[in-house]
Image (tube, rainbow, N blue to C red):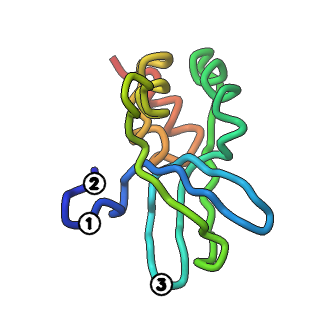
Amino acid sequence: MANKSHPFSAGTIVVATLSNPREKFWGAILALTPEGLSLCGIELASFEDLIPMVKEGEAFSPSIVFFPMHRLERMELDLPDGGIPSLSQRFASKTGLDPSQVLLRPSGEEFQALKERP
C-alpha cells in the first residue's frame, strides 16, 4: 500500500525498532504523525509462533499500539532483501493469507470470516 511519494503511509507493512525498552514490531501502519506511530501488528519475537496459529485457524487479534516518536529508533518497509523474502511474503506463503488483510482486521471474529471465505 506504500506509494513512492509517501512510502510510510497508512496500510504499509513495516518493521519498527523501538528503544527503552528495545523491541521490534511487525505490522501495518495506522497513522504516522509527529507525535508517534500507530500500528496494528505483533512483536517480531512472536512472528514464528503466529504462523502455525493462523494456519490452524485459531482466532488472532493483532495488537493496536501507539509508540511515541521518542521511542521510534528506526522504521523500515517490510521488503525482500536479495534472495531473502520479506516477513509479509513468508506469512503469505505459509498461511495463504494476505498479511495486510489480516493485520488491518483486528477482530478475531473478522479474522475467522476471512479464513472461511472461499
In the image, residue 103 above or below residue 92: below
Q: Which residue is mark 2?
A: 2
Q: Relative to 94, is 60 on the left or the right?
A: right
Disc 2 marks a residue whose amino acid type is Ala
Task: Please name whichever residue, 102 or 85, is drawn nearer the observer in this view of the structure.
Answer: 85
Residue 29 in percent (x, y) is at: 45, 59
Q: Relative to 61, is 14 on the left or the right?
A: left
Residue 58 in percent (x, y) is at: 65, 24
Residue 23 in percent (x, y) is at: 72, 54
Disc 1 marks a residue whose amino acid type is His
In the image, residue 2 above or below residue 86: below
Q: Which residue is mark 3?
A: 34
Q: In the rendered structure, are the residues bearing label 1 and label 3 in contact, judged by CB atoms less than 8 Å apart?
A: no
Q: Quadrant of residue 84?
A: top left
Q: Relative to 7, is 95 on the left or the right?
A: right
Which residue occupies the extreme left position in the image?
4
In the image, residue 13 above or below residue 72: above
Disc 3 marks a residue whose amino acid type is Pro
Upstream in the sequence, badge 2 or badge 3? 2
Q: Which residue is mark 1?
A: 6
Upstream in the sequence, badge 1 or badge 3? 1
